[in-house]
Structure formats: C-alpha cells, structure tokens
Image: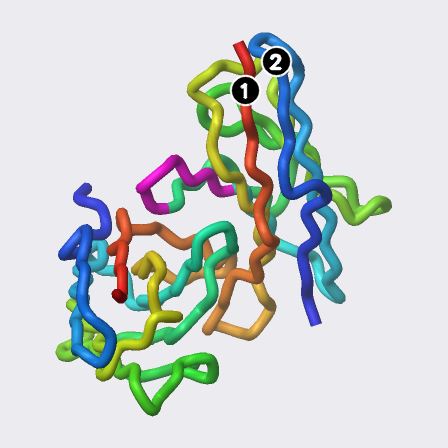
Amino acid sequence: EAGVAQSPRYKIIEKRQSVAFWCNPISGHATLYWYQQILGQGPKLLIQFQNNGVVDDSQLPKDRFSAERLKGVDSTLKIQPAKLEDSAVYLCASSPGGLSGEQFFGPGTRLTVL
Amino acid sequence: AQSVTQLGSHVSVSEGALVLLRCNYSSSVPPYLFWYVQYPNQGLQLLLKYTTGATLVKGINGFEAEFKKSETSFHLTKPSAHMSDAAEYFCAVSSNAGNNRKLIWGLGTSLAVNP
C-alpha cells in the first residue's frame, strides 16, 4: 500500500512570508497528525484530526499556524507569517485507529526561514 | 500522565558491537510501546512495537526490545551494529486517551557506529 505522502520536501522562505504544506495519508486512515520537529529534538504534536474534525490543537500556535483536513482525507498546514524559529521539519502521520495508536509517517517537509 | 525517558542522547558503538538503547516509561495503565528510527532527511519508521503478549518483541533490521513491567523499561538491542544503523532512535508510549490516542515521545538517542 502507498505510504503517507508529503509535499514539498524542502522549502526556503523569508521571514514574514507564508507557506503551506500538503499531506495525503494512507488510504482509510481516519486519524491524521501534524508534527513539528526542530533539529536535534523529538516530534512535537501540532494538531490531530479524526476524519475532518480537530481532536487536539492545544500546541498549535494559532496566531500564525492553521490546518485543515477537508473531506477527511488530505490535509494542509499553513504558516502565516513565518518566523525564524519556525525552521524545522514538519512531519505528517496517519493512523488507522485501534488500541495501539501506531502511526505511519511521511518523509517530512524541511522548512528553512531566512 | 504518561512519559518516556531515553537515557543517553548520544550513543557510540563500534561496528559489530552490541547496540543497547535505553527507554523507561511511566504509565498508570498497561502501555503500548514503540521504537521508531529516523534516518537523515527522512521521516520516522516503525522498528517494533509492544502491545500485548510476548514481552520480547522482534523488529526490522535485527532489532529487538524487551518489555519489563517491573522495571518499566523497553530497551532496544541489536547484537551486532552495522554502519547503516547510524540514525536517531525514538521511544514512544501510546497515551490511554480513549479512541483518540497520541504517542508520547522520548527526546531521542542518536546512534553513531564507528568502523
């Protein structure tokens, strides 16, 4: 089966610009996660969707970050305006649900803010 | 609340030597435990997981981990390191938040393999 797809793989922008990332989860996976991973650190959950509803966005900086999952499949994460500290890898993961909570990850998008 | 502690942010071994990456967890309920690996410029890949049943879990690339409830540990081992094992390794525990489960992550251990 196809894995989690993300695009673009790399993005370089100037501070105060906007940027958007796209994620296509594994077919049939109801739960989708966006993580931020700063160099040398573990993944930090930004937002969790169950189908097209938000389950947890407690760590999403809502003044500049937004995310949506229309029709409960693809998702986009947007940053507007970007700050230098947003430089990180943005990981998308999906899960089929179930008790274990296993997640399947995409390759990530590496964002550099200059 | 659940948490994960990975002892040692950096581990260095020689090629052919035993790999031991340590993970301890805290959980008020029986945990589901995971080890993920992240190669440079890639996403996270599941190495192995413990849910229920056998406490010694075998994963991909020759890795295995043993769930020890009495020690609240889930250490990752591999008998003989290869150069290709150099990567970042993350231990995680699945939160018991009903159907909307999350993974609680350790800070990661960077494994270096020396020739």
Q: Is residue B7 left or right of residue B47?
A: right
B23 or B50: which is nearer to us? Answer: B23
* Residue that protrudes farthest toward the right in the picture: B70
Q: Name the chain under label 1.
A: B
Residue B66 placement (x, y as % from top left): 69, 34
* Residue that protrudes farthest toward the bottom in the picture: A63
Of the residues shown, which amino acid type is indicated by label 2?
Ser
Residue at point 27% right, 66% down?
A113
Which residue is the site of mark 2? B14
Q: Earlier in the sequence, mark 2 or mark 1?
A: 2
Is A46 within the magenta? no
Which residue is the site of mark 1? B113
Relative to residue A113, is residue A82 depicted above or below? Answer: below
Residue at point 62% right, 46% down?
B52
Relative to residue A6, is residue B67 depicted above or below? Answer: above
Label 1 near label 2: C-beta < 8 Å? yes
Residue B38 placement (x, y as % from top left): 42, 40
Q: Is residue A7 left or right of residue A95?
A: left
Residue A90 placement (x, y as % from top left): 31, 61
Residue B78 placement (x, y as % from top left): 60, 20
A66 or B77: which is nearer to us? Answer: A66
**Which label was assigned to residue B89?**
none
A57 or B65: which is nearer to us? Answer: A57
Residue at point 56% right, 31% down?
B111
| Location of residue A89 (image quadrant) | bottom left
Asked whether the viewer can see residue A52, the reply is: no
C-alpha span from label 2 to label 1:
5 Å
Relative to residue B19, is residue A85 depicted above or below? Answer: below
* Secondary-structure class at tag 2: strand
The boundaries of the magenta stretch are B36-43
Q: Name the chain under label 2.
A: B
